[in-house]
Amino acid sequence: MTEAQHKGTMPDYSIRQYQDSDFEMARYVYGQSVKDLTMVAFHQALRFPHIRLFVVATFLLILVTTGSLLLSSLSLVSAALVLWMCSRDFFHSYVKNTFSADMLDFQKFYMQREGYGFWVAESGGQVVGTVAASTFSLPSGEKHVELKRMSVIKSHRGKGIAKAFCRTIMDFARRGGCAAVVLETSLAQTDAQKLYEGMGFRQTRSFHSPNITARLIGNKMLSYKYSIPAGR
């Protein structure tokens, strides 16, 4: 694949195919980017009405039954701690599972399979972002590409790298004769949602993760789809 150079507002990075020398940094960048969502999901959970209602009800129940403001206050601290731990567990476990699955061997899973690919963003000789693609066919025979593992390290966010990754996968899908690019993201990834919608993706459904900790913090999964215009 031709290396994509990006000039203008961000001239110091390029999008290129994964190389074996990228292994450690690619995993680090992706893992750190996912773990960064812990705080976002925690704050988001605190704003959900049903969680607030439960916390307040628990506070009042303990206050009424014990008459102790200290114990009631401790219930608030305990509830916040549980939400934090659930948020952390979900994202850290997700990274661990990913590292033992497709990101255990990039060459075998992505680079040596037809219809698959893995790219990194490089800046100053360092990997600062990752994205992957996998092609699959529907029962009708129509082919779709799934956009996966997109991440940008915090120091390089807001510079257009994520948009460049999306375009890379869109181009990959077009060349492969695919009808659409699809993806899944979490409710906590608000910036990603804005990016996808701004680039023409539409949300197709939302659903609860089977992960119990994700359910406790109300972190739903969202599916998006970008339909590739005919003749392009």
Image: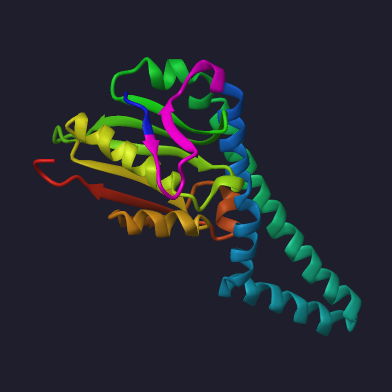
Residue 68 in the figure: left or right of residue 119: right
Q: Quadrant of the C terminus?
A: top left
Residue 10 is a magenta residue: yes
Q: Is residue 219 above or below residue 34?
A: below
Give the camera-side residue of 105 and 217. Answer: 105
* Span of residues in magenta: 5-22
Quarter in which the N terminus is drawn: top left
Left/right of residue 199 with respect to residue 109 in the rendered view: left
Tell me: 51 left or right of 174: right
Residue 224, given in percent of the width and then of the height, sits at: 33, 51
Up/down of 96 relative to 58, above or below: above
Q: Residue at x 33, y 37 (%)?
A: 168
Is residue 34 depicted above or below 121 in this figure? below
Residue 109 percent across, percent down from the top left: 42, 20
Q: Nearer the viewer, residue 55 or 164?
A: 164
Q: Is residue 98 left or right of residue 117?
A: right
Dividing the picture into quarters, in which one does residue 69 lie? Answer: bottom right
